[in-house]
Image (cartoon, helix red, strand yellow):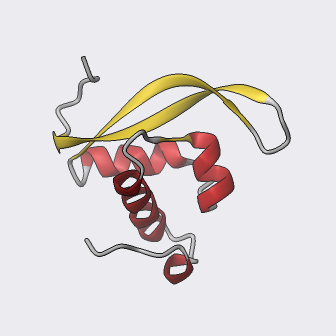
Amino acid sequence: MNKVSRKSLRSNAANNQRLRIEQALKDTPGGLTSIQFYEDYDIQQPSARIWELRWIRGLNIVTEKTVATTAQGGTHDNARYVLLSGKWQGRKRA
């Protein structure tokens, strides 16, 4: 997939959200949190798009539990999504 700019995918259609998430994870080897997807990519429910990318596209995206800070300074239990090589096998990273 070619590098996707957020400007070219302003629509919040599910497919555009999936494309934004996929590109963002490719560009960020350490992964991104739900809060980052919400604040930086305008994706309100990244977990739904992650599920689709795993089970429909076969992307090997793992979820790690973390604590993240919002732009307002609050801390929250959060999920960090990390794209790994290979196909999704329905299991977590060892």
Residue sitting at 42 percent across and 39 percent down? 30
Left or right of 54 in this view: 67: right
Q: Residue 59, image x and y in percent?
A: 24, 47
The N terminus lies in which quarter of the figure?
bottom left
Left or right of 30 in this view: 69: right
Residue sitting at 44 percent across and 51 percent down? 49
Residue sitting at 39 percent across and 66 percent down? 19
The C terminus lies in which quarter of the figure?
top left
Q: Residue 60, image x and y in percent?
A: 24, 41
Q: Residue 76, image x and y in percent?
A: 71, 26
Q: Residue 88, image x and y in percent?
A: 20, 38
Residue sitting at 45 percent across and 70 percent down? 16
Q: How many marks?
A: 0
- Outermost residue toward the bottom? 8
Q: Eyeballing the image, is 63 above or below 42?
A: above
Left or right of 29 in this view: 13: right
Q: Eyeballing the image, is 40 above or below 36?
A: below
